[in-house]
Image (tube, rainbow, N blue to C red):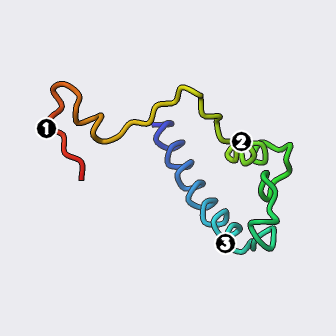
Amino acid sequence: MKRLFASAGLMVLSCCLLPSAAQDKETKGPCHPSLSTCPKSGCKDSTSPDGVENILKHQHPKVPDDFVTLTIDDFQSLPGRSHLEFG
């Protein structure tokens, strides 16, 4: 019974907090005038967890020299896969 009340309390609390967090996000304008002036860390400090995550999102892995590009024909030619159709 205590778990039921605790769960209900958490549900009510989260319902009260979520709208205010959404409102804060909506009233905030852009932190930079354009995307070209925005740093890789975004609106966050580059040493904060969110800033580091934003920086990591801008990194692209190096394509290996032995990279092979597969085509739809490659997949259709696999044994037992002739029923696959790609539109």
In the image: residue 50, left or right of residue 45? left
Residue bearing mark 1: 83
Residue at position x 69%, y 42% in the image: 59
In the image: residue 22, left or right of residue 54? left
Front residue (pair 45, 38): 38
Rendered view: 79 above or below 55? above
Q: CA distance from mark 3 to mark 1?
A: 49 Å
Which of discs 2 and 3 lies nearer the camera? The answer is: 2
Residue 82 on image: x %, y %:
15, 34
Q: CB atoms at circles 2 and 3 under 8 Å apart?
A: no
Dot 3, how many residues are within 10 Å of its Cα: few (below 14), some (14-19), or many (20+)? Answer: few
Front residue (pair 1, 51): 51
First of labels 1, 2 by sequence position:
2
Residue at position x 50%, y 36% in the image: 2
Q: CA distance from mark 2 to mark 3?
A: 25 Å
First of labels 3, 1 by sequence position:
3
Q: Amino acid at mark 3?
A: Glu
Residue bearing mark 2: 56
Which of discs 1 and 2 lies nearer the camera? The answer is: 1
Residue at position x 64%, y 36% in the image: 61
Rendered view: 24 above or below 52? below
SS under mark 3: helix
In the image: residue 53, left or right of residue 66? right
Residue 16 on image: x %, y %:
60, 61
Q: Amino acid at mark 1?
A: His
First of labels 2, 3 by sequence position:
3
SS under mark 2: helix
Q: Amino acid at mark 2?
A: Leu
Q: CB atoms at circles 1 and 2 under 8 Å apart?
A: no
Residue bearing mark 3: 26
